[in-house]
Amino acid sequence: MSTSFKTFPIWAFFSLLTNGILMLAVILLIWQQQRLSAFFGTITSPELINLNNSPQIATPDLGRRHQLTYQEWVDILKQEAKIAADQRPPHLSILVGDSLSLWFPPELLPEDKNWLNQGISGETSNGLLKRLKVFDRTQPEVIFLMIGINDLIRGMSDEVIVDNQRQIINYLQKTHPTAQIVVQSILPHGAEEATWKGRDQLLTVANSRIRKLNQQLQSQSSKKGVKYLDLYPLFTNKQGNLRREFTTDGLHLSPEGYIVWRSALQIYSEIQLKPQRQRPAGEKD
């Protein structure tokens, strides 16, 4: 057979995307998008990454953002949300979460969307719940939520995390009734290979516990009528830990890790989200 993976059409494997087949699709898409490897040499530190990829939404000059206090972060996100609310860019997608969402390279976010990043480093589910009102006035098409790893590191129980996520979903559904809400699974960590400064606390959280917690989040998402994107299996090695090439310190993601996430978002949007907003005019449910 002469057709190579590099020229394999994306539509040809979209129909295969059920359950675990998402992993295969992501691998194929990454293969097609190898040109993105150029970013490996340009993304060297979080300080170089802009918060917003949209040319229609201005971004404040953040300087050395890792030195900001929590409240300073909230104030900046409030400014960005206000701009998004005033300008109302089409196809607005919002990333909500902690540092994993915060440092998502704008260059790697899926195209054909305007992105508003509402992530804060070290964020917990309780902290996020209290600041959701910051982007009340925006009109997002999709809200991508990932939260929970910092709760686990700080010793919060699974029951509290699940309940906080339930309250977050309730708030988002009430405030943004037309938006599609996508709960994303908590990612694994690097276990013994982790070099993150909070390694000791991280190692108290077994990846097996994260898997079980993700099952609860998936079940709750189904009951609440929101979507669930299971990223966890895309990032694990044979031992069930975060793959070395996808992380910088066993917790945070490398550019390669973000390419995997970006590919999953792009495919998921094509399959689960785009058909809904492309429904022909006059067609009923």
Image (cartoon, grey):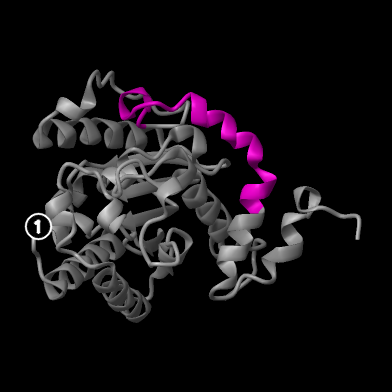
Q: Range of the magenta residues?
A: 29-51
Q: Residues within 10 Å of mark 1 (few under 14, many from 20)?
A: few
The residue lying at 33 percent from left, 60 percent from top is 188
In this rendering, the answer to whether 58 lies above or below 229 is above
Residue 156 in view of the camera? yes
Give the main secondary structure of the magenta stretch: helix
Front-lying residue, 200 or 235 = 200
Q: Amino acid at mark 1?
A: Arg
Rendered image quadrant of residue 168: bottom left
Front-lying residue, 12 or 244 = 244
The residue lying at 62 percent from left, 64 percent from top is 24
**Where is mark 1, residue-wise?**
154
Is residue 212 found left or right of 141 in the rendered image? left
Label 1 residue SS? loop
In this rendering, the answer to whether 121 lies above or below 18 is above
Q: Position of residue 174 (x, y in %)?
A: 27, 64
Residue 43 counted in the magenta span = yes
Front-lying residue, 151 or 265 = 151
The residue lying at 12 percent from left, 58 percent from top is 126
Q: Position of residue 224 (x, y in %)?
A: 32, 76
Q: Position of residue 23 (x, y in %)?
A: 56, 64
Give the quadrant of the N terminus.
bottom right
Is residue 277 found left or right of 132 in the rendered image? right
Q: Position of residue 280 (x, y in %)?
A: 67, 62
Residue 213 counted in the magenta span = no
Front-lying residue, 80 or 219 = 219
